[in-house]
Amino acid sequence: MILSSLLVSILFGFIIDLFFRLVKNQGDFSGYVSVGEFVSNGRGKKWLQYFIFRLIPPIIILVLLNSILLTKFILEDRLVYLIICAFVSLSFRDFFQIFKRSVFINNKLIHLLNIFLVIICAFAINYLPVELLEQISPDISGIINSFWASLFLAMIILFYYDSTSLVKKRNESDAFNRAKMNYIKSSYDVIQSQFDKTIKECCTKNNCSVPLMYSILIFENMNRPRLFRLIENFIVKIFKLRLTLGIAQVSSRLPLSDIQSITMASKILKYSASLDETALHLYPMHEKLLKNDIFLSFMKKYNSDPLYAQQICDIMEEIRNFNYGMFRNGNV
């Protein structure tokens, strides 16, 4: 009985995942939004619609599973099986994303929130009234026949979408690039509105590259949202540790405001303005700038991780696409 219940729970978890895969492969008509695309929409996020879309399928399947475990398997303790089902359904869409280095912290936070909400739903569904579960429990022979027919049909549809060129498939690379571009543009607008004067003054004083400064601020803001920066400052203040602080993430033993961190960053990037004219004419920038010794020397001063330099190049290239003039004279 335990093994059967476990297998059913795992199977129902895969059904939830299969649903999202089917929706995902139907292209732009489906309205499917990845976490990256959702985060990239900046202040225009439709939180309610997004989470309703993410939660309704798991809730339906978990309620159905709970009713079957109660009425067909005669289980009193069903919570563990509901949690297993939830974890299986979340594995590919959310859990694995949390451990990818290429996924920004903002995106990881949304994945964590998805996980948290689905698990909370599983706990809530476990406490639904027995009378309600008995009423909605389907006939076991009928559901088995319907289930296998539906699963078989779903597998055929999924295979069709994945293999045929007659259907417009979703281009994950394009979706990711579009999400990244939108996020960079929205982050740029926010940073410009808050720190425009500081960036201009600091970069002028230290002959610092404005595009390079913006790229670093955008990347660090992605990975260290404001709440994280507040926590880091609190840790430094209490424990006197040396951490990277502020929106520019510069090393300090004392708490730093975002403006103070920008000022310190401009000193690290002093005389980097010579990169602007060079970067302006590099195509593709994200490949050729990584071979530029001057750029790499500044990146080693700031952060020696090769992945860091690559991300900064990518962001600089996106900035050039929507603000070409910045590379000419530092205008923002």
Image (cartoon, rainbow, N blue to C red):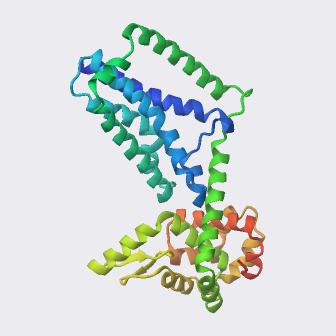
Q: Position of residue 98 (x, y in %)?
A: 43, 50
- The quarter holding residue 231 reads bottom left
Instruction: Tell me residue 93's x, y (percent).
Output: 48, 40
Q: Residue placed farthest to the top in the image?
A: 141
Q: Nearer the viewer, residue 305 or 130?
A: 130
- Name the residue located 39 percent from the left edge and 14 percent from the top edge: 138
Q: Quadrant of the N terminus?
A: top left
Q: Please give left or right for residue 71 compared with residue 271 in the image.
A: left
Estimate the x, y position of residue 200 in percent, counting from the top left. 65, 85
In depth, the one of 112 and 58 nearer the eye is: 58
74 left or right, relative to 277? left
Vertically, is 18 above or below 134?
Answer: below
Marks counted in the figure total: 0
Q: Is residue 29 above or below residue 98?
A: above
Q: Specify whether residue 99 is in view.
A: no
Toward the bottom, the furthest residue is: 205
Q: Is residue 203 visible?
A: yes
